[in-house]
Image (spheres, helix red, strand yellow):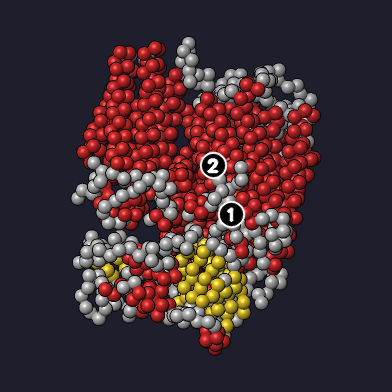
Amino acid sequence: MTSVTVAPPPRHYLNVAYTATSWLLTTDHKRIGILYLLSITFFFVIGGVAATLVRLELMTPEGDLLKAETYNKLFTIHGVTMVFFFLIPSIPAVLGNFLVPLMIGARDLAFPKLNLASWYLFIIGGTFTVWATVAGGVDTGWTFYTPYSSTYSNTHVMATAVGIFITGFSSILTGLNIIVTTHKMRAPGLTWFRLPLFIWSIYATSLIMVLATPVLAITLFLVAVERLAGVGVFDPKLGGDPLLFQHLFWFYSHPAVYIMILPGMGVVSELVACFTRQRPFGYAFIGFSSFAIAVFGFLVWGHHMFVSGQSVYAGMVFSILSYLVAIPSAVKVFNWTATLYKGSVSFYTPMLYALGFIGLFTVGGMTGMFLAALAVDVHVHDTYFVVAHFHYIMVGGMVMAYLGGIHFWWPKITGRLYPEGWARFSAILIFVGFNLTFFPQFVLGYLGMPRRYHVYPDEFQVLNVMSSAGASILAVGYLFPLTYLIWSLRYGPIAPANPWGATGLEWQTTSPPPTYNFDQTPVVTQEAYSYELGDAEGRPPEEIGRE
Amino acid sequence: MNDLANPLAHQFDDLDQQRDAAELGMWVFLATEVLFFGGLFLAYAVYRGQYGEAFAAASHHLDSWLGAANTLVLLTSSLTMALAVHAAQTGQRGLLVGLLLATLLLGAVFLGVKLYEYHHKYEEQLVPLFGLPFHYEGSARSQAMMFFTLYFIMTGVHALHMVIGIGVLGTLVVLAWRDGLLAERYIPVHLTGLYWHFVDIVWVFLFPFLYLVGTR
Amino acid sequence: MIDEGFRLFPEQASTVAPRVDALYFFLIAVCGSITLLVAVLIVYFAVKYRRDARVDRRRRQAHTYAIETAWIVIPLVLTMIMFAWGASLYFGMSRPPAGAIEIDVLGRQWMWKFQHPEGNREINELHVPRGRPVRLRMISEDVIHSLYVPAFRVKHDVLPDRYTGLWFEATKTGEYHLFCAEYCGAEHSRMRGRVVVLEPADYQAWLGGGTAGLPPVEAGRRLFEQLRCDTCHRGGGLAGRGPPLENVFGSEVRLADGRTVLADEDYLRESILRPQAKVVAGFEPIMPTFEAQVGEEGLMHLIAYLKSLSSQGGTTTP
């Protein structure tokens, strides 16, 4: 990071106006990105508090702290808010919104008003869900399996389903906006193979958002109709088939897992490139693997149903397809690792998060191999093994990437630098806390502890206590960035336009950028990541020619 | 999207780019809609596979003549819509307003017939919703119930799309009357046309699936 | 008592358990080495090429395609081994061996009910003999449950309105956990019990010592008579208004609409509850529904009886 004192640009998107309406009616993609940042942080806190209470309860085998009903509502709220209101909008809606036009040299997204409408839909959907929580909660788990959700549960299933339904349209519209923007608004000279890898991954994510979310919408719509109108589309008592719900639900929710990881992969590609001063090894392979994941991701939903009563042969087909979807993810990991080779590696906070991501995502992906192996899945399905596996992907992967991205682009977003020392410390704390929380859960899962258990046999207690201890470290770890990032808004040093010496169009404009991003439309003449090469004397590229 | 003085929004370089973007956006939206209806058609396919016989019997309770008439009405409205787009492109304001009104009217006729059919089913006690009395003569009552449940959900969601389409058409009529929506401003008409054709096509699938499954 | 001491690896108490564990260890070995390799390389490169290190950073022409192909093909081969191994085991686990003891399982919020072929009933406790295959025929009265015995490495969802099956052969006497693994409502985590594995002789003694009810076949026969099923389904080769039921189970039945279906447990169940759904060719759809008269237990008894009328009454695929 350069420590030259710099002056902020006189006019930028943050200081053009300060009124509430200038924020609430803005069509500036950067301001909408910030609106999303604030709202998903709110939901992260709700989901985090619920998780904390769940882990506290699990410190002992008996239900000492919470009643069973309360516990069930808490893990449901944790799942619903974290999946639909934090992870899915996290990188696409915050960083995607902020960065896509900047990275492709556009003045805004293709449909700015639609973009604002998406945020309002998100808020309306969120309000329904928060209302359902406050009014008494919902206890179906985020998976809403029928017939429990459609007939038996007497909690606020309707309000929550409606909330998720509405929020679904928010992500459909965000995806639509990003797809059109990427196709039609790229700066002159910015061909597809000159695009930053973040754009490739966010584009692939948008395809999934647009094609998978409507299926969830119609599924939840059917559950709602079933409850409201008393019909039995999924209720066996009325001739319905509860497994149909699972097929429809996972047809969305498995691709949704890729909505929750692909953008993280995009961020990590950016971070690794910048902090090794290298063009990512196998640029095209990383790019195309995003599409391979997006396509295969639609064909593996049945691997959530190996013990549900679907046919043995269907299970085999879904198993082999699940293995195939693992290959493009592996390709990415190997390429990132190879990018470090002969690079000039620096260890600023975003890079620490990126390295943490690669390690944790690898563990998460590799444990996916266990779950795709049919016979092993029979044993670990619906146990803590699954819980640990997807938290390694979602938290170890996506949240790490999100935090890495937030730190990396913080100077661009706010015009201020964050405190490096504190940031490094909390990145390491989060990494340690995360592993202590979730690694014991793999062991618990193979031992046979089912998920969503409020009370459990005594022999599982030691590992549960370890997990809860880790969770407390993790919680503290998350509080640090929340604190020092807010602090930096006022006291952080003024950021230069390009504090990392990174390539990419977003670094060529001021920090923070002006309302229409660029004073004049940039023209691209080079490949992405055209960092200079190091030389034979072993000097890293940025030192060459400086002495 | 664009104010009147300058039809070009700030984020675009030229009108071509703006038109391409709007058109692509509409196609992406329609892709979403295909998947949305796809879920319903999947549910239909699953139960049709399980209860083929009962579905065929139950579909005899629908009036396929009314369904056919409605199909004709909707196809005609697609024609008037296509002509409206052409009128907008070629700058014929009077014709545009007339054709939009015709489309709107045909859509309303479709909904009217649909409403009549719904009412008829209500009188026949074939509405398995909201705990209404369900009175079915034939065998396999619960399976017929599933047929009518799907019938009401699928045609209901389709009708909702029609209502939205009619609302948009109404707005277009007013705008076309006042401001023209002609030549380079024809994009809204064009996009509404795409949407209208899509809703039409959905019905083209619904009609045989629901009304004609019983005919062999 | 179930051993509830701290442990890091579950007990192996069925024939499939060691085989599943073998695959598990193979996966740990392969996936562990790859993860370790990635981790070591990351640390090594990151330290060696740290920004202030004086090392040769000149890049030669990299054979990108060769390298990429290698790390696509090698994982592909490895995953296909994992797939084949997992799938063949799974296939075996889904096919119960002939001559298994058939035990009926009824799941409901929030308890498990079992009934042995000899008639013994249990709640939240299941006694089985060591060294003999046991097949569970399971159904739920309300929501979806899932029967899970970690020590046996077996689990299967228990669905409403549809029979599912599960089989195991215990290899070690003792007591083991039995869990509900599919979230089913408020007391989901208390819907658990234990499986007691006894030596065959002890199992026989246990069967004799308990308060045995009627065996399911016998209870089914009585119910069959009590519901007057025999007025239409007349046995002994006599023509009746309903099709004869001898040897129906396990056979291919031709339906009025021309299709044929396999007369398995689900078909028999559906024919009692919704007789009009699949009418046998040559018969009028006149049978009334018995939805109101027969509960899940009665259905299981009737089906057990019907199976006893068939020469193939042993087992079918679940």
Q: Considering only vertical position in the picture, is A490 above or below C92?
A: above
Disc 2 is placed on an element classified as helix
Q: Nearer the viewer, residue C129 or B89?
A: C129
Q: Are marks 2 and 1 in contact (CB under 8 Å)?
A: no
Disc 1 is placed on an element classified as helix
Q: Residue at x 28, y 27 (%)?
A: B106
Q: Considering only vertical position in the picture, is C270 above or below B134?
A: below
Q: Nearer the viewer, residue B6 or C63?
A: B6
| Chain of the residue under the numbered disc 2 shown in the image | A
Q: Position of residue C313 (x, y in %)?
A: 36, 78
Q: Residue at x 39, y 55 (%)?
A: A238
* Residue A444 left/right relative to A292: right
Q: Considering only vertical position in the picture, is C240 above or below C75?
A: below
Q: Position of residue C5 (x, y in %)?
A: 71, 72
* Residue B188 left/right relative to C86: left
Q: Nearer the viewer, residue A438 or A540?
A: A438
Give the residue at mark 1.
A365
- The numbered mark, 2 or 1, whose residue comes first in the sequence reads 2
Q: Residue at x 48, y 60 (%)?
A: C142
Residue B28: which quarter of the image? top left
- Label 2 packing within 10 angstroms: few (<14), some (14-19), many (20+): many
Q: Residue at x 74, y 39 (%)?
A: A481
Give the residue at mark 2.
A159
* Residue B120 left/right relative to A195: left
